[in-house]
Amino acid sequence: MKSLILFLSLLTLQCLRATSRVCHVDDLAGLLAFKSGITDDPSGLLESWNGTDCCSWFGVTCLSNDRVTSLWLTGQPERPDGYLSGTISPSLAKLRDLDGLYLMNLRNITGKFPVWLYGLPSLLFVYLGNNRLSGPLPVDIGKLGTQLDVLSLAGNRFTGSIPASLSQLTGLTQLNLAGNLITGKFPIGIGSLRNLTQLQLHNNQLSQPIPEIFSSIHQLRFLNLSHNKFSGKIPNSISSLSSTLAFLELGHNSLAGQIPSFLGNFQTLDTLDLSHNNFTGPVPKTFSNLTKIFNLDLSHNSLSDPFPVMNNNNFHLGKIPNWVTLSPIIYSLKLAKCGIKINLTNWKPKETYFYDFIDLSENQISGSPIPLLNRTEYLVGFRAAGNRLSFDLGKLKFAGTMKELDLSRNLVFGGVPNSVAGLEKLDLSRNSLCGKLPPTKFPASAFVGNKCLCGSPLPAFTPSLKTSNSLQFPIIMKSLVLLLLVLSIIALQCLVSTSRVCHVDDETSLLSFKSHITHDPSGMLASWKSGTDCCTWEGITCLHNDRVTALGLFSQSDTPTRFLLGTISPSLAKLKDLDGFYLVNMRNITGKFPTSLYGLPKLRYVYLENNRLSGPLPDDIGKLGTRLDVLSLEGNRFTGSIPSSVSELTGLTRLNLAGNLITGDIPVGIRRLKALIQLELQSNQLSKPIPEIFSSLDQLRYLNLSRNKFAGKIPNSISSLAPKLAYLELAHNTLTGQIPSFLGEFQSLSTLDLSWNNFTGALPQSFKKLAGISNLDLSHNSLVEPFPVMNAKRIRSLDLSYNNFHLGKIPDWVTSSPNVYSLKLAKCGIKINLTNWNPKEAYFYERIDLSENRISGSPIPLLNRAENLVGFWASGNRLSFDLGKMRIAHAMYDLDLSRNSVFGGVPSSASELRSLNLSRNHLCGRIPATGFPASSFVGNDCLCGLPLPAC
């Protein structure tokens, strides 16, 4: 992690220097050779790599002598084009001053471990995580040198055993080989790495007992050996880590015996995971000493009573204890709901170097976290929800390691910075933020309850500016001045005393809402108490006048106890300043649509998703008003037709009625909703032809009418959506006729799903223009050839199954695509030898369905490359190969090879699958214990043993 400080420091120095320089000729040649080894760069990571000053190129850092000191290129896993394809050129060995090589999350970097790194005398940091490097780790990997600080090779495809020479890297503080295919035993020589603070070997195939090596690795704070095949007992030498170890994960192995009592002496232990093993006996009484434990998982063992009484303190500390503030080695500080009342601006811990995670949620902390976070360069997570923090978010600098940030339910103001895109978890809800959201992957729940945020995933704010640019400028400047004035007022308000009491009408209304809730198993409304400030209650957002502006209660479908049972009280009509009402995934909120919302003059957002509201939508739903921006009622039990008065909601940018029981047709009045960006009516019982209403909806980007009973043809007016529509799903209806050629003109289209209809004729030749298409599903129709030669370089998911195609082979534009993750060509008339099919990139493949064709040969070469494959279906072909030689990837869940000519025996690894069909082949021998029914194995030559008759 020290690399980030160096990277940022050097980047700052670089930015301060004059730009009229030329980097060293050897470094320039080395980097250009590296670039030449990259065959695909769809996101343009290397676009700036031109000219002679390589020190100004993206990802390159130099020192004052114009020698390159670090190469930092990282992909974006959430983006399909956020990768590089190619190999690591050995020419980088020319970068003689390189101390950091960071090629992370690039996904398509192939080849073996770059042994030319051995010749770099200054190398400290090697981060090659989440690529596609493969082969065994070199036996002489110790030649990287004793100066090496970090070796991180996680998320590749390295095989073989861990080389013994690794013990020569005595300067290592971090060793991460997780997420590979490494086998063999845990090498004893790792005990020589006395400086290790992190050891991560999880998600491999290591086996045998864990050796007694930990007495000499007394700096270890993070040890993860989970998801392997280790057996035997927990080694006694782990007891020597009791003073430093904070994270111990041994889950998903085959460890046995009793849990050792010394684990209760680990006073710094934050996470202990011993799940999915074979431990027996009681949990040691010493576990009552684990006062700092935060995550404890002992599930899926054979443990018995008695269970020790573990400390469950209810602290009211007032401040962060001095012994914490003065500690030089803390890495994880979690003091949520400990009654802390401090100004965070003034809290200055002695040493923040080791801080990975800070949780100060649910206290009464004021001030700003900026001074603290500016010092914590390696922070991974910061949680401070439910406090009184007040600062400009735009001035917050995110550490490069930051993955999680929760500032919800505070008084944070300003705008949301672009850097939040690099986070994995984010919650900024219920603050005082304003402005347009930058592009992010986070849901609306991360931003709701702010005064004036806009843009996806929240509704867009698109003012109409019809004047010329010269006339717009003073208008824009006046708007900016007004915005600055508003922010200044908010900032001043946030700095005053917070000893407020919310408006009496709002408190009365909310307490009435609570009285209509009959069951709250997770205590979601526990903070809703009479006489307290309702602006501090969970789910409530107020503005400076102490009037409630948003009521937002959210749950996740995978959290079974977080729901509410009851009805929506009409008393909410008293919340006169309410602009957002969000009840999402509450599951047991019943009753009819709350017409009490009509009387709320400022209401803009209504999200009542995944509850149990029922009955017809009210005929006068248009009374919600023209100011309403979003109406989302997905996942309820509403019946009847869509009221015609919905056309009066002319301010709507999003209308979502999906997943109900709505019947009838689409009212033509929807054409009046000219601001619509998203229209979602899927999974209802709508019928009749789709009306010609789309000519006036020229802002529409997302249209989903799937899983209804629509008949007739695709309306011609959809053609007017060509400039902007990115998502069109009409699947699972009874649409007929030919697919219109105008769909090939949709240059912004990313997803097109026309499956499970009654379309006939040939696919339009205009489809070859769909260069930006990522997901195309035309399956289960009656389409015929000729099939156009497409230019879909970004295709990720393709399903042409069960039409009347006779393709002959898998199309070249599919074979050459680097991004495909789902390929379904069942019953497409394919006649190839699968042994010889070599797609350009098999790394992303998750699902392949080639059923009901005339394919011969063996799938083994393909499956050996498709390491992430979840499902492979090839029934009803002519495949012929020895099943015993097929390696079933760890990710594989579903395998169907029925009705082929497969021979050999059934491998024991088949037991790890979720579904299996090997019927009607030529298999022989005893069936291993799998748990699958007889239908998975019938019709073979000589299989025997359960579930078939005994051998």
Image (spheres, rainbow, N blue to C red):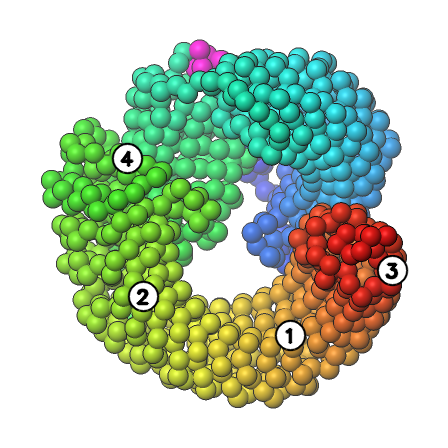
Whole-angstrom CA distance, mark 3 to mark 4, is 64 Å
Q: Is residue 675 visible?
A: no
Q: What kind of element bears circle 4? A: loop
- Dominant SS of magenta comes to helix
Q: Quadrant of residue 535?
A: top left
* Picture layout, residue 606 above or below residue 836: above
Q: What kind of element bears circle 1? A: loop
Quadrant where the N terminus lies? top right
Whole-angstrom CA distance, mark 2 to mark 4, is 30 Å
Q: Residues within 10 Å of mark 2 (few under 14, many from 20)?
A: many
Whole-angstrom CA distance, mark 1 to mark 2, is 34 Å
| Residue identified by numbered label 1 | 800
Whole-angstrom CA distance, mark 4 to mark 1, is 52 Å
Question: Which x, y percent locates residue 54?
Answer: 67, 44
Q: Which mark is residue 526?
A: 4
The structure residue drawn at horizontal position 19% and vertical position 58%, both measured from the top left corner, is 597
The magenta span reads 323-327
For this rendering, which residue is in front, 256 or 289?
256
For the residues bearing labels 4 and 1, Cβ distance under 8 angstroms: no
Question: Which x, y percent locates residue 616?
Answer: 27, 68
Mark nearer the N terminus (2 vs 3): 2
Q: What kind of element bears circle 3? A: strand
Mark nearer the N terminus (3 vs 4): 4
The structure residue drawn at horizontal position 30% and vertical position 52%, both measured from the top left corner, is 589
> Which tag is nearer the camera, tag 3 or tag 4?
3
For this rendering, which residue is in front, 232 or 162?
232
| Residue identified by numbered label 3 | 942
Q: What kind of element bears circle 2? A: strand
Mark nearer the N terminus (1 vs 2): 2
Q: Residues within 10 Å of mark 1 (few under 14, many from 20)?
A: many
Left or right? Give the position of 51 relative to 512.
right
